[in-house]
Amino acid sequence: MTSRVAVTGLLALSAVYFLFPLWWLFVAATKPFGQQFSGNGLWFQGFSLFSNIHRLSVEDGGIFWRWMLNSLIYCGLGALIGTTLSSMTGYALAKYRFTGRNALFGLILAAVLLPQILFTLPLYLMFSRVGLVGNPLAVLLPSVVSPFGVYLARVFAAQAVPDEVVEAGRLDGAGELRIFGTLATRMMMPALVTIFLFQFVSIWNNYLLPSMVLGSDSTQPVTVGLVGWNASHVDVAPAYVVVGSFVSIIPLIVAFVALQRFWRSGMTAGALK
């Protein structure tokens, strides 16, 4: 009983710790414009959220929504392609026996441990050499590779896709691609949603690479745009950055809440392995 109370207390403290910045951001975004950093930071002083969003929408010709659209395109395409490639690779590692399979999986596990920020400068130099600096492909191409997604897909495919089902599909005359697309993909759906969400959030939060390879305001994601506004606080009021930061996290919250039924089971499968 005592241990359960202690664990519950630690979880409650962790929840407060992680939710505290979000609560402050929500309260600040609702304050009258220009008063975001005044008064009590944890409680409301009026409710001007919609008025603030309207101001944000017309600032600098509505560039904020262009940044949001860019982020949605980068994250949507990158997560979709990355999930497809990860699921195919993970399924192949789980269901096919070939020389070097364990060594290849070991390399993928090693890649999971490496911080992605280490690849930023080499990627910039490579894209500069081939003339992709300033092109949105320089952001999109690295985002479709996810070692953690391959690992999760491999673990889930080994558990959720029985070898008997694969053999039955082959006996019925189905090709390997059809077995993967019609049978394995449905059984792996919780893991695929989890990979998609992780990839989506990772691309959304990526700042360093887009800030290095994209110079035009019209192609930047919302993270780079808001940091640019914050750096030029003489020209752009800090209140715009606060309201924009709050609006920018809404798609992430909506995605996690809408797909929680899938990613919860996907995370559990990875933990059991």
Image (cartoon, rainbow, N blue to C red):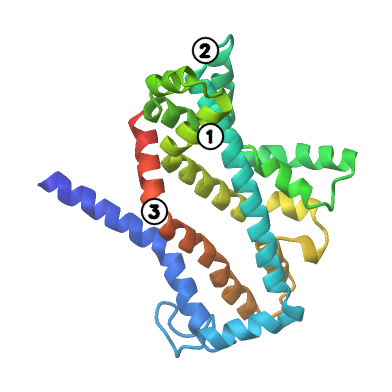
Local packing at callout 2 (Cα closer than 10 Å; few below 14, some 14-19, many 20+) is few
Question: Circle 2 sits in a helix, a strand or a loop, which is it?
Answer: loop
The amino acid pointed to by label 1 is Gly
Label 3 vs label 2: CA separation? 34 Å
The amino acid pointed to by label 2 is Arg
Q: What residue is pinned by disc 3?
A: 260
In terms of depth relative to the viewer, which is nearer, 208 or 57?
57
User: Where 194 sits versus 218, above or below?
Assistant: above
Answer yes or no: is residue 234 visible.
no
Label 3 vs label 1: CA separation? 23 Å
User: Where 240 sits versus 7, above or below?
Assistant: below
In terms of depth relative to the viewer, which is nearer, 251 or 20?
251
Answer yes or no: is residue 20 visible.
yes
Q: Position of residue 258 (x, y in %)?
A: 43, 59
Q: What residue is pinned by disc 2?
A: 97
- Compare marks 1 and 2 and give the one earlier in the sequence: 2
Label 1 vs label 2: CA separation? 20 Å
